[in-house]
Image: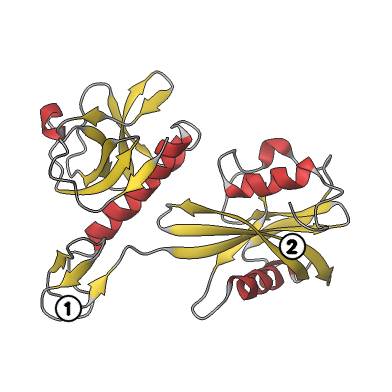
Amino acid sequence: MKFHPAVARPPDRDREGWWFLFHGDRLLVETRGETAGIPFFADPADRGIVPVRTQYLGTLDGLACCAGEIEDPAVPDGAALRSLRSLLGILPEERFVLAGRAFQIVDWERTHRFCGKCGMPTVPVEGERAKACARCGIQFYPRVAPAVIVAVVRDGKILLARSRRSSAVFYSVLAGFVEAGETFEECVRREIREEVGIEVAGLRYFGSQPWPFPHNLMVGFTADYAGGDLVLEEKEIAQAGWFDAREVPRLQIPRRGTIARELIDWFLANPAGAGRGGK
Ligand SMILES: [Zn+2]
């Protein structure tokens, strides 16, 4: 599967393609039993769907991909509106990633119809994923908010924590938003210090994952414990501790398809080696 992003539909390309249509933050999917798929059609109007705004995303294996926003929550027979989060692990991975991209663009388009500086309507900038104010010329691009996510390892054990925000008993690696003026490395050290009171060293880049809830980019690192005792930030963290491979609660960790799970799986694949030179 190969996706090629583009901003404008080539004039010779017909309208048929994959349609990522959102009502609010829910995606229109075709459902058959437990499965869900992205609808493929020439024109949403053929199914009685009239998007208020549409965007061209590019091509997936040569087929057009389009996004749009629908105001009417009524859906055709055999279709449903589902939250993106509920489709993680249900949609094929490349479609889920594309749906996340589509959501971020739809959400940006919806929230940047007017200039944030002077209030005049914005207009699309030709050839770019950008909008400009018709009066003052200021340009707006889709927002991406970076967040770091870190697996900290100490003597063959991984640091896992349970957040107060999640109602289920659920353990994961620590994460936090990058602040203005901060490097990823500074953010990792600050977040870990703030949330659990310890120092880390030996940061290594692990990988990244767009996380469209609503427009984050998760940047993963591994790190070694470097000092201090666990002191929890009680408003955020309900519980935190060091888990060896046998102690990791496998039914209470993030699901596959998330970078949080990839970090935990990285540790589980080589608990003794983790923390000594990275993956
Ligand atoms: Zn303006």
Nearer-the-camera pick, 183 or 112: 183
Task: Please name the colour scheme applied to the rendered image.
Answer: secondary structure
What is the three-letter code of the residue carrying label 1? Gly
Please, what secondary structure does the residue beneath circle 2 have? strand
Q: Is residue 28 above or below residue 131?
A: above
Residue 40 lies, in percent from the top left, at 25, 29
In the image, taking residue 203 as reference, residue 183 lies left or right, namely: left
Q: Is mark 1 within 8 Å of ligand 1?
A: yes
Please give left or right for residue 244 compared with residue 166 in the image: right
Instruction: Answer left or right for 149 relative to 83.
Output: right
> How dense is the environment of label 2, judged by Cα within 10 Å: few (below 14), some, or many (20 and up)?
many
Q: Quadrant of residue 268?
A: top right
Q: Residue at x 45, y 42 (%)?
A: 85
Residue 53 can be seen in this image: yes
Q: Position of residue 144 (x, y in %)?
A: 41, 63
For label 1, the crowd category at 10 Å Cα-Cα, with few meaning under 14, some 14 to 19 and many 20 or more, is few
Nearer to us in this view, 85 or 201: 201
Estimate the x, y position of residue 233 in percent, counting from the top left: 68, 68
Q: Earlier in the sequence, mark 2 or mark 1?
A: 1
Q: Toward which corner of the image does residue 205 lie, by quadrant?
A: bottom right
Q: How many marks?
A: 2
Q: Tell me residue 139's x, y (percent).
A: 24, 73
Q: Kindly identify the amino acid type of the residue bearing the numbered disc 2.
A: Ala
In the picture provided, is 199 more to the left or to the right than 86?
A: right
The answer to whether residue 170 shows anywhere in this view is no
Q: Which residue is disc 1 drawn over?
A: 137
User: From mark 2 to mark 1, how far is it between C-alphas?
Assistant: 44 Å
Q: Residue at x 64, y 44 (%)?
A: 261
Checking the image for residue 223, the label placed there is: 2
